[in-house]
Image: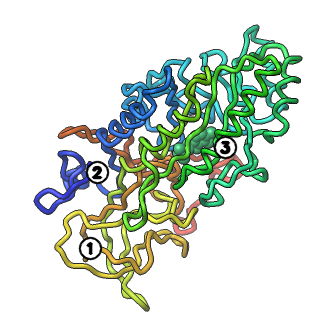
């Protein structure tokens, strides 16, 4: 169920009318529904209830806002982090160290030290060289690092090339065929304790088949590792389950379908299952609320120029992603338009020749399914402000990241000594 609904002709997030947020905070602004996140977290928990103490490690990169993390921590979720910054956020949100998994292909020694000092469930190592570095770090700190190898199962995730990670040519994980040798060699590295195996084959998966194939490979690998005397206790199958962006397309598998598949393949294996969902939890919990600046005539249809742009939501420019777009107060009529932002790039287009609610200058619109990989990727290109984020819970709402204006960024910048003292050309002395 959506938590963004029309009430008396006006789009609400839960019980809050979106025009009220726009009036108070300005546009563009990201708006998140607490209930939508909770519903997804609970659906996944229920779907995995047949397993013994599974760890749902939310992929922080999907939406790292501290208020989002706290909401999910209250639902019992842990965290999958890929940097020291994300590790710190997870801890600041109150997520217990033993519910944090550290992933990522380029962990530095500093990041390893930080996580070891604070504690974590496991590092998912992506190469043997990384294991060697972690061994040195752990040894110097006099502690033991819990580790899993992230394997590359060499399956085609069937998703967009830029968000597929489990094929042999992708940079992620160690080739599954090399894992036995790598784990054997790990025995010679002091300061490491092998706990499990991990994988993550890609994002926005719309079929369970590639996941199922990869989990079967992981299962066979666990059996082989055990036969060589390794005590494998965790099986991390990653994240990646897709969500619905375009209501005209068939919906991706539900959390229930996903949970049933994962449960069938991992129950009775005497491992603790770890899953790392990101998009699934937050994707449909957010919208980007924007105002129409003006309508500009175009060769085939008008351009609707909105005050949000590719710097706020990169997914269309980066992945050709499709996002639903509508008016906040639709009048029941429609138009065909290109919806574009003000940034000076031809790629700053949210939709082309799209049938949308009729809008005019000054009207509010929403770009939907903007809870994941949206605000977290936002930047300030074209010296635009960093777009704020608002969290709604029932009838309450709060700014959870304020707008940072271009003035604030300008104040952060420094003129080096050799450029100081220049006079403005139009202010000669
Ligand atoms: C990005 C990522 C995830 C989350 O992917 P989603 O598609 O958002 O579920 C999980 N694990 C790792 C290692 C990732 O890099």
Q: Nearer the viewer, residue 374 or 146?
A: 146
Residue 222 drawn above or below residue 163 = above
Q: Position of residue 410 (x, y in %)?
A: 52, 50
Residue carrying label 2: 2
Q: Earlier in the sequence, mark 1 or mark 2?
A: 2
Disc 2 secondary structure class:
loop
Q: CA distance from mark 1 to mark 3?
A: 42 Å
Image point (56%, 18%), residue name: 98
Which residue position holds label 1?
Answer: 357
Q: Nearer the viewer, mark 1 or mark 2?
A: 2
Q: Viewer-proximal residue, 207 or 39?
A: 207
Mark 2 CB within 8 Å of ligand 1: no
171 and 387: which one is in front? 171
Q: Residues within 10 Å of mark 1 (few under 14, many from 20)?
A: many
Dot 3: element:
helix
Residue appearing at x 70%, y 50% in the figure: 155
Q: Which disc is residue 214 wearing?
A: 3
Quick check: 195 left or right of 239? right
Q: Position of residue 92 (x, y in %)?
A: 47, 24
Quadrant containing ligand 1 reads: top right
Q: Residue at x 18, y 40 (%)?
A: 395
Outermost residue toward the top in this view:
142
Q: Is the residue under label 2 in contact with that under label 1 (CB below 8 Å)?
A: no
Q: In this orientation, does residue 32 appear?
A: yes
Q: Secondary structure at mark 1?
A: strand
In this image, 80 relative to 294: left or right? right
Horizontal side of residue 146 vs 398, given as left or right? right
């Amino acid at each position: 169920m959506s938590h963004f609904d029309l009430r008396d002709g006006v789009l609400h997030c839960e019980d809050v009318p979106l025009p009220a947020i726009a009036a108070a905070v300005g546009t563009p602004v990201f708006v998140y529904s607490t209930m939508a996140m909770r519903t997804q977290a609970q659906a996944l928990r229920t779907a995995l209830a047949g397993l013994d103490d599974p760890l749902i490690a939310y992929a922080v990169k999907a939406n790292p806002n501290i208020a989002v993390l706290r909401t999910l921590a209250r639902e019992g979720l842990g965290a999958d982090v890929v940097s020291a910054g994300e590790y710190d956020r997870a801890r600041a949100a109150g997520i217990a160290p033993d519910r944090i998994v550290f992933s990522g292909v380029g962990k530095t020694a500093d990041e390893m030290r930080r996580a070891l000092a604070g504690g974590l469930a496991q590092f998912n190592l992506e190469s043997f060289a990384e294991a060697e570095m972690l061994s040195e770090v752990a040894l110097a700190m006099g502690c033991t690092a819990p580790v899993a190898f992230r394997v590359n199962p060499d399956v085609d995730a069937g998703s967009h090339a830029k968000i597929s990670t489990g094929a042999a040519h992708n940079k992620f994980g160690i080739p599954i065929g090399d894992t036995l040798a790598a784990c054997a060699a790990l025995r010679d590295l002091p300061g490491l304790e092998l706990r499990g195996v991990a994988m993550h084959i890609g994002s926005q998966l719309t079929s369970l088949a590639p996941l199922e194939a990869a989990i079967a490979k992981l299962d066979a690998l666990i059996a082989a590792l055990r036969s060589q005397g390794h005590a494998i206790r965790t099986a991390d199958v990653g994240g990646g389950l897709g969500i619905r962006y375009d209501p005209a397309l068939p919906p991706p598998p539900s959390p229930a379908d996903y949970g049933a598949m994962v449960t069938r393949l991992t129950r009775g294996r005497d491992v603790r299952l770890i899953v790392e969902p990101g998009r699934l939890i937050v994707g449909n919990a957010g919208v980007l609320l924007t105002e129409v600046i003006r309508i500009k005539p175009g060769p085939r249809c008008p351009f609707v120029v909105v005050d949000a742009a590719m710097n706020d939501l990169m997914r269309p420019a980066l992945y050709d992603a499709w996002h639903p777009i509508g008016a906040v107060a639709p009048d029941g009529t429609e138009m065909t338009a290109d919806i574009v932002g003000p940034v000076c790039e031809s790629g700053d287009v949210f939709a082309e020749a799209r049938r949308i609610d009729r809008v005019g200058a000054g009207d509010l619109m929403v770009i939907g399914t903007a809870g994941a990989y949206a605000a977290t990727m936002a930047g300030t290109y074209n010296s635009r402000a960093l777009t704020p984020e608002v969290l709604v819970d029932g009838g309450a709402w709060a700014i959870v990241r304020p707008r940072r204006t271009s003035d604030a960024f300008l104040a952060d910048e420094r003129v080096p000594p050799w450029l100081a003292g220049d006079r403005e050309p139009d202010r000669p002395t």
